[in-house]
Amino acid sequence: MRPVHTLAEALAQEVLVLDGGLSNQLEAQGCDLSDALWSARLLADGPEQIGAAHTAYVRAGARVLITASYQATFEGFARRGVAGAEAARLLGRSVELARAAGEGAAEPVWVAASVGPYGAMLADGSEYRGRYGLTVRELERFHRPRVEALAAAGPDALALETVPDTVEAEALLRAVEGCGVPVWLSYTVAGERTRAGQRLTEAFGLVAGVEQVVAVGVNCCEPADAARAVGIAAEATGKPVVVYPNSGEVWDAGARGWRGTGSFDPDRMRDWPAAGARLIGGCCRVGPDRIAALSTALAP
């Protein structure tokens, strides 16, 4: 069902369940993501697979879907021989696919267009380090064309997500100025600092007075770190908090696989709304089964 209220209005009334990791669901569907474009490749080669993944999360109870544009950039598409106009069309398609998946839901489903960090385009893991050696102005120039293309597709929000440092956060906030779409800003963190090492109180403080930012928080991090960040984000900004951690497993780059056991526990997330969380979901390795459990755990 298409929402009649804005995302900000909804957050003032209720806690919304986000979807989970898109890539792990696509892999579960048999998709090969061993490509620098990752899941964004399927915007051109397998859009029906993206639609099916979104639908799986809607059926699990997700009320907000994040588009398959995290790793979709003009630069990345250009390396595959996709020209600017076609790249813009594919970015728009990411919003259309999520919107279509939500149309048949019994409850309203909001669509957040993913704006991943600069490091995601590099496809070398640098989004978990930040400090790329680029200025705020240079990062703003990188992000703005994609922001404009996604905004033109009519999402309910832009998800400025997996942001590793305050330099890129500042660039993203500049890039979205005037785009006409509300945003959330979500850092990837380790402990109580960004991946680049800045204190979260400082990082969250960047958006304290920015009206366009309707939520602030963390994603793509350990569940325990996410739990600690909720209260910090709420206190630093007074805004609704968005939080969607990984499963708790650890990526082994050498073995190119996940190790350890998951610590994503929906029952432990029941307390997060009391601390200020209004958008709660999962990131890497969190599938529809966990989102279904989370939806049940957070039900009034």
Image (spheres, rainbow, N blue to C red):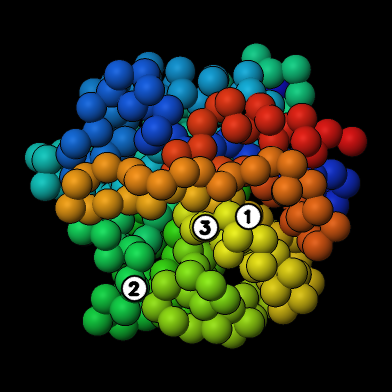
Lower position in the chain sequence, tag 3 or tag 2: 2
Q: Estimate the x, y position of residue 12 in percent, counting from the top left.
A: 85, 52
Secondary structure, mark 3, is loop
Q: Residue at x 54, y 20 (%)?
A: 55
- Which amino acid is tagged 3? Glu
Q: Residue at x 76, y 24 (%)?
A: 107
Q: Position of residue 116 (x, y in %)?
A: 40, 55
The CA span between labels 2 and 1 is 20 Å
Q: Position of residue 49 (x, y in %)?
A: 37, 19
Q: Earlier in the sequence, mark 2 or mark 1?
A: 2
Residue tagged 1: 243
Callout 2: 10 Å neighbours few (<14), some, many (20+)? many
Which residue sits at x=21%, y=45%? 256
Which of the two residues, 19 or 262, is positioned nearer the viewer here?
Answer: 262
Numbered mark located on residue 222 in the image: 3
Q: Amino acid at mark 1?
A: Val
Looking at the picture, which amino acid does disc 2 mark?
Answer: Gly
Q: Using a 10 Å C-alpha cutoff, classify the residue at mark 3 as few (fewer than 14 neighbours), some (14 to 19) or many (20 or more).
A: many
Task: Tell me where residue 48 sits by quadrant.
Answer: top left
| Side of 73 relative to 36 (left or right) | right
Secondary structure type for disc 1: strand
Identify which residue is drawn at 70% across, 64% down: 230
Mark identifier at residue 130: 2
Q: Is residue 78 left or right of residue 216?
A: left
Check if mark 2's residue and mark 1's residue have beta carbons within 8 Å.
Answer: no
Looking at marks 1 and 3 on the same chain, the residue that comes earlier in the sequence is marked by 3
